[in-house]
Amino acid sequence: MKTIEYFYAAYSGYAYIGSAVLQEIAARAGARLVHRPFVLRTLVTARGNTSRVEDAVYRDYAFRREIERWAEYRNVRMLGRTPTYHQESYETANRMLIASGETGEQTDRLAHGFLEAHWADDADLSDRETLLAIAASAGIDGAALIEAAGAEEVAARHRANTEEAIARGFFGSPTYVVDGDPFYGQDRLELVARALEKPFANDWAPTS
């Protein structure tokens, strides 16, 4: 069975835009979608991209205009602005996804639920009651999942996902990996679909 490793953060706008399409691609290809939530802000700092993200011109293009265009293209609901609570911690949401299991329809539903609630309904992913409501709407016992998310083994997995994203040289969220070949950004989803059918050639010599 083909596998898609899905590295993302529970509050990522571009992960949201590609979420439904990703799940459709995986289902159509009969591929196993493996959720790997990680700490995006840690990766951005590790790659030295903090100054670019803080640049007002880049931010306006990448996190306003591009999101606006792609949301229209993918036909997803959007607030039309950055969510109010976007700078709050989303660690519990990430860890709930890990506790839910790396694969399966439940985790798929919860991941999409977090992303959509944040970007379309202005949900605060740091708020316990909000997380419980999102889990309930996905048919999941949120209280039990939050308790499970507090386990050290889940925290360790969260750290390991983040460290792996850094070690593998990823740029951000979302990053999809098919047979070891990473595709950064939801705008590469059509390439992900093709890679599941036929791997891309990899003939270029690596740069030094």
Image (cartoon, helix red, strand yellow):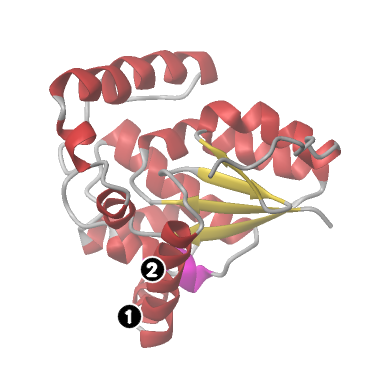
Secondary structure type for disc 2: helix
**Amino acid type, residue under disc 2 in the picture:** Arg
Place of residue 163 in the rendered image (x, y in percent of width and height, measured from the top left): 41, 66
| Above or below, 94 relative to 188 | below
Structural crowding at the residue carrying mark 2, measured as other residues with C-alpha within 10 Å and reported as few (<14), some (14–19) or many (≥20):
many
Q: Is residue 83 visible?
A: no
Left or right, 198 with reference to 56: right
Left or right, 150 with reference to 154: left
In the foreground, 177 or 200: 200
In the foreground, 132 or 164: 164
Secondary structure type for disc 1: loop
**Amino acid type, residue under disc 1 in the picture:** Gly
In the foreground, 164 or 133: 164
Extreme residue in the bottom direction:
152
Which residue: 54% across, 26% down?
187
Look at the numbered discs 1 and 2 and tell me whether their residues touch, using CB distance below 8 Å: yes
Q: Which residues are magenta?
A: 95-100
| Above or below, 109 relative to 129 | above
Identify the image quadrant of residue 16: top left
In the foreground, 86 or 205: 205
Main SS, magenta residues: helix
In the rendered view of the protein, which quadrant contains the N terminus? Answer: bottom right
Q: Earlier in the sequence, mark 1 or mark 2?
A: 2
Extreme residue in the front direction:
208
Left or right, 56 with reference to 13: left
Q: Is residue 88 visible?
A: yes
Structural crowding at the residue carrying mark 1, measured as other residues with C-alpha within 10 Å and reported as few (<14), some (14–19) or many (≥20):
some
| Above or below, 193 relative to 58 | below
Place of residue 184 in the rendered image (x, y in percent of width and height, measured from the top left): 52, 38
Taking the magenta stretch, the answer to whether it contains residue 155 is no
Mark 1, residue position: 150
Which label was assigned to residue 95? 2
